[in-house]
Amino acid sequence: MKSFYLAIVAALLAASSQVYAYPEMIRHAYTACTTCHISPDGGGLLSGYGRALSGEVLSTWHTETEAEFLYGAVKTPEFLSFGGHFRAVQTYLNNDVIEQGRFVFMQADLEAGIHVDKRFIFVGTFGYDDTSGDFVSRRHYLRFQPDLKSPLYLRAGRFYPSYGIHLPDHVVWIRSKLDWGIPLREPYTFEASYLGAEYQHILSGFVSRPDDSVTDSGVSLSSQIVLSKTAKAGASAAYTARLGQNRFLFGPNASIGFTPEFFLLTEVGAQRLSNLTTGQNTWSAYGYARLDYEVYTGIHFYGVTEMGRSNFNTTPVSQGYGFGTQFFPRPHIELRAEYQRQRGDRPLWSDVAWVMGYYYL
């Protein structure tokens, strides 16, 4: 059971290098991530419009310049964009075998974007990697848009390939248990994106870094149909290989805004893991759903459920259900807490909870 707790902590540590995104903005009729972010897949460096929305749409309170970089105290030239990500979390696990909590400082990264011209943007991060004890650039890439009115984007560099809904809470089972992010660290990736008004596709090819033998290499495709101004549905697939094994992942997803305050995020993922030495195939699958209601601007309450199976031949069904709250008191400040009652591969129920604080510079 201690390994179960360590897996939760490992998932949170891996999330420290993930870019933060809010796919629930679909409820406000923002169907494309590039409305607010430089990255076509969302998360990371914000555009000026994205900064403004963090105050006007997401936050409970804000002033006129509060959402700007350094609260508007420093005016940056038009060709430069700056940001930063700072996160920490307190975890808790309790069952009949173990009771344990841990504080994890997840992330301290600065991020900058250089607009070479209106078509080329170079983005890079610089921060502290607590797993190696070194200062590193975990993510850097060059993005190219042939024309400002074009839905086509090309991107190359070091970043996560696109797969599924860009969920910010990477401890969800469809990420952690299907190894998307763990042990898949930021590989070198080339990406082509088409973000049209009706159809959106992101095709990624990626290879592991020379200094990282456990990172996958492969291809992934995420496709979505814009059903309405506040709803998208689609599917993702990926084929990866590493260390004598390959795997195939696939599954549908949906982001639906019923009203500006009420939305659903849901995704299912299945995996076939093939051992090239023994020829054995292992099938696993997990599902996730979050139903959220914003009771007042910036104050959310939600229910969450997860279900899955790590090995269809040997393990029972895993279950998780619970609730959480999310609070955006001021622009770029997020406080979040979640509790779940979970049962993994063992027939033992656990109380799992975490509290997270996030600040975007």
Image (cartoon, helix red, strand yellow):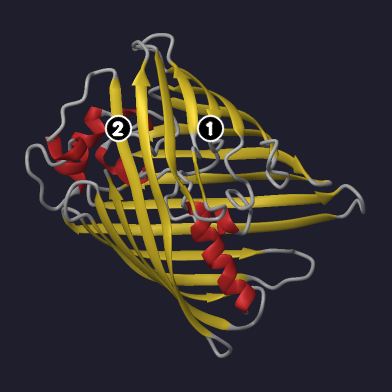
Residue at position x 69%, y 42% from top?
A: 216
Residue at position x 88%, y 47% from top?
A: 276
Tag 2's secondary structure? strand
Amino acid under disc 1: Ser
Given residues 11 and 300, the one toward you in this image is 11
Marks 2/1: CA–CA distance: 30 Å
Instruction: Kindly tell me whether residue 93 is visible in this rendering.
Output: no
Q: Quadrant of residue 123?
A: top left
Task: Please name the residue that numbered disc 1 is placed on.
Answer: 223
Residue at position x 71%, y 40% from top?
A: 240
Amino acid under disc 2: Phe
As drawn, which residue projects farthest toward the front?
134
* Earlier sequence position, callout 2 versus callout 1: 2
- Expressed as whole percent of the image width and height from the top left, the position of residue 316 reads 69, 73
Tag 1's secondary structure? strand
As drawn, which residue projects farthest toward the right?
278
Q: Quadrant of residue 211?
A: top right
- Expressed as whole percent of the image width and height from the top left, the position of residue 3 reads 63, 73
- Expressed as whole percent of the image width and height from the top left, the position of residue 225 reads 46, 32
Left or right of 218 in this view: 308? left
Quarter of the figure that contains the C terminus:
top left
Task: Please name the residue that numbered disc 2 is placed on.
Answer: 82
